[in-house]
Image (spheres, rainbow, N blue to C red):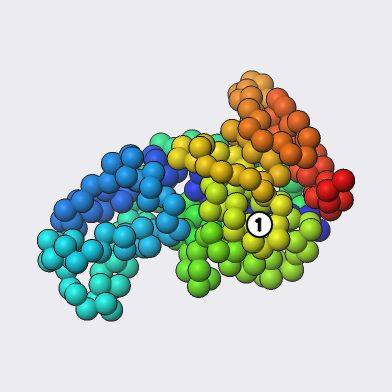
Amino acid sequence: MPALIFDCDGVLADTERYGHLPAFNRTFEEFGLPVRWSDDEYARKVKVGGGKERMKTLLTPEFVAEAGLPTDADALDEQVARWHRRKTEIYTGIIASGAIPPRPGVRRTAEEADDAGWALAVASTSAEPSVRSVLELAAGSELAARFSVFAGDIVPHKKPAPDIYTFSLGRLGLDPADVVVIEDSRNGMLAALGAGLACAVTTSAYTGQEDFTGASLVVTSLGEPEPRETVTEVLSDPLGLDPRPFVRLADFESLLAASAAGPN
């Protein structure tokens, strides 16, 4: 059975800049922490996989002392977990408000794949409640219920390690040759490639300048036909798919066929 596996943040919706960043900063404010991440700072933080891991980058000896935090490692871990639980609550509230629109083409592509009998999944190392809230926003509740969701701390290593995709393949019983992953970042792409999966990239707010060598396709978005027309800009197309004016399921079928055939 062929399958589409979507990353969450940046793929289903452009959530990093408009969801996660303000949620982190509101959390820091609520806990009285002496930090607010700017857009430029957060552009660097997104290269760290996982929200708790991003928070832990703050924990220099100087920051711990200034914030009056415990120095015991276990106590610090529990403090970070409390921050992250609150951050997830704030973030899911932002998503539920409808303030962040889904990315173009996500629901259309998922519907086409579902109608054609493809398996659908989301694989993300973000917290599961956050992932499910974005999936419902992007796909609608009925279609979202047809997705398998693999998220959070279910694997020991986060992207760019391939663990989340290897785990997903095992749980779904899929042949890697039948799977297309849709990612938005170099770390995500490396995770997919490391699991032996073909990867298409839809660049997002913080990832447009990253190196996507190895991806089967790189586009600005999946695109939409009229009346909500969003034209796909093709940034890299090593297989010659030419998916314009917008990406169709047939393009992913061609991607799998070309990947199976290997280099000429």
Quadrant of image for the N terminus: bottom right
Foreground residue among 209 and 99: 209
**Residue drawn 78% across the image and 56% down it:** 178
Q: Is residue 43 visible?
A: yes
Which of 98 and 38 lies nearest the eye of the viewer? 38
User: For this view, does 210 lie left or right of residue 69?
Assistant: right
Residue 134 horizontal/vertical position (percent): 50, 48
Residue 66 relative to residue 205: left or right: left
Q: Is residue 84 above or below residue 222?
A: below
Furthest-front residue in this view: 264
Residue occupying the point 33% across, 40% down:
40
- According to the picture, the residue beneath numbered tag 1 turns out to be 193
Quadrant in the rendering for residue 81: bottom left
The crowd level at tag 1 (other Cα within 10 Å; few <14, some 14-19, many 20+) is some
Is 50 in front, or is 98?
Answer: 50
Q: Residue at x 61, y 25 (%)?
A: 230
Q: Amino acid at mark 1?
A: Leu
Please determine whether, in this image, residue 250 is positioned above or below residue 229.
Answer: below
Q: Secondary structure at mark 1?
A: helix
Residue 57 position, x and y percent, is 31, 60
Q: Is residue 138 visible?
A: no
Image quadrant where residue 213 sits = top right
- The percent coordinates of residue 212 (x first, y second) are 60, 44
Farthest top residue in view? 227
Q: Residue at x 29, y 66 (%)?
A: 80
